[in-house]
Amino acid sequence: MLKGYLASRKEPENLINIFDSTNKVAEDLKQLPEFQAVQEAVEQLKGNEEDLKLYREVMQFQASLQNKQMSGQEVTAEDDAKFKEYSEQMNGNQNIANLMEKEQMMFQLLQQIQQAMTRPLDQLYSELNN
């Protein structure tokens, strides 16, 4: 993805270096226990056909709800009821609940990384408020 972006633009060398650094961080993430926990949870889910089917159904339903909302359609009471039912099923499913827990831990880590990466901008803009 980043290579395609770089190929389409002529940028200074320092921009290429930042993408190299970003790719390195992405590779380093794979070595973290949080990532490995998500990876294990995914494998466990893939190993149970019934749980995987439920997961895929829920993801498709969520996508259809998002598309509905983005196109300006109203979410119906039936949609809400189905969403609540799916949520209960997912929370009661050990493999899916485990995956969601591990994802949340990973996303917390990614949020911390994002905050570190955007700190220079935050500091710059904070000067406008002083």
Image: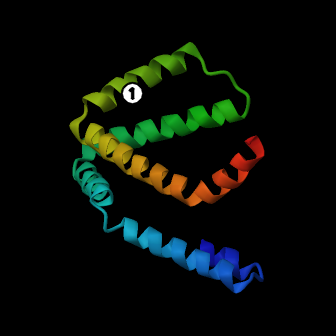
Above or below: residue 80 compared with residue 52: above
Q: Which residue is drawn at 61% across and 21% down?
A: 75
At 31% across and 41% down in the image, what residue appears? 101
Quarter of the image containing the C terminus?
top right
Residue at image x 25%, y 28%? 92
List x then y, in percent, for residue 109. Answer: 40, 52
Amino acid carrying label 1: it is: Tyr
Task: Choose between 76 and 101: the one closer to the eye.
Answer: 101
Q: Which of 35 and 91 is in front in this view?
A: 35
Q: Residue at x 46, y 70 (%)?
A: 25
Left or right: 3, with 101 as reference point: right
Whether residue 90 is situated above or below residue 129 in the rendered picture: above
Can you say whether 36 is above or below 84 in the image?
below
Label 1 belongs to which residue?
Answer: 86
Above or below, 19 against 68 in this view is below
Percent x, y of residue 37 = 26, 55
The quadrant the N terminus occupies is bottom right
Instruction: Name the quadrant containing residue 28.
Output: bottom left
Which sits in the foreground, 19 or 124?
A: 124
Q: For label 1, count other residues whose C-alpha is less than 10 Å away and answer few (under 14), some (14-19) or many (20+).
A: some
Q: Is residue 15 left or right of residue 32?
A: right
Rendering quarter of residue 43: bottom left
